[in-house]
Amino acid sequence: MNMSLGTIKARIAQDQSDRRRFARLPIEVDAKMRELGASGVEAKVVNISERGFMAVADGRFEVGSRVWLMLPGRDRANAVVKWTAGDKIGAEFAEPISLEGLKTQASNSSPASS
């Protein structure tokens, strides 16, 4: 099978099954993360949706591992690590979460206009 780079890109663009269905909210919130049965590490959530999040974390997590995300003033949320890149991880929540209250934190964490 001989495919050009353009053909591969076109096939990827046509594949809607891997497209995010939930908008990501850019945010900077200090949190804690821990793998099930392990101790917690400091993390900063940099974007979040009802179904997942991206964070920068002090610890190392394996793709496929189950983690708890603990955001200030909220119940902990269970998630599965989907990817890692250095100190960044992306995870999908086991159950959708509400973004209520996080939108306010996102507004407060964005730089002020001068």
Image (cartoon, rainbow, N blue to C red):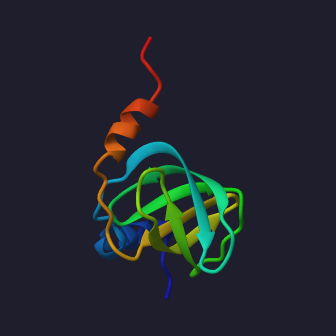
- Location of residue 83 by image quarter: bottom right
- Image location (x, y in percent) of residue 82: 52, 73
The residue sitting at 65% across, 76% down in the picture is: 62
Residue 112 % position (x, y): 44, 20
User: Is 86 left, or right, of 48 in this rendering?
Assistant: right
The image shows residue 92, relative to residue 47, as above or below, that is below
Residue reaching furthest to the top? 114
For the point 39% across and 39% down, the residue is: 105
- In the displayed orientation, state which residue is furthest to the bottom: 1
Q: Is residue 55 above or below residue 84?
A: above
Label tally: 0
Q: Which residue is pictured at 39% across the width and 71% down the height?
A: 12
Q: Based on the displayed image, in which of its 4 quarters is residue 40 positioned? A: bottom right
Which quadrant is home to the C terminus?
Answer: top left
Q: Nearer the viewer, residue 72 or 21?
A: 72
For the residue pair 34 and 58, the one nearer the viewer reads as 34
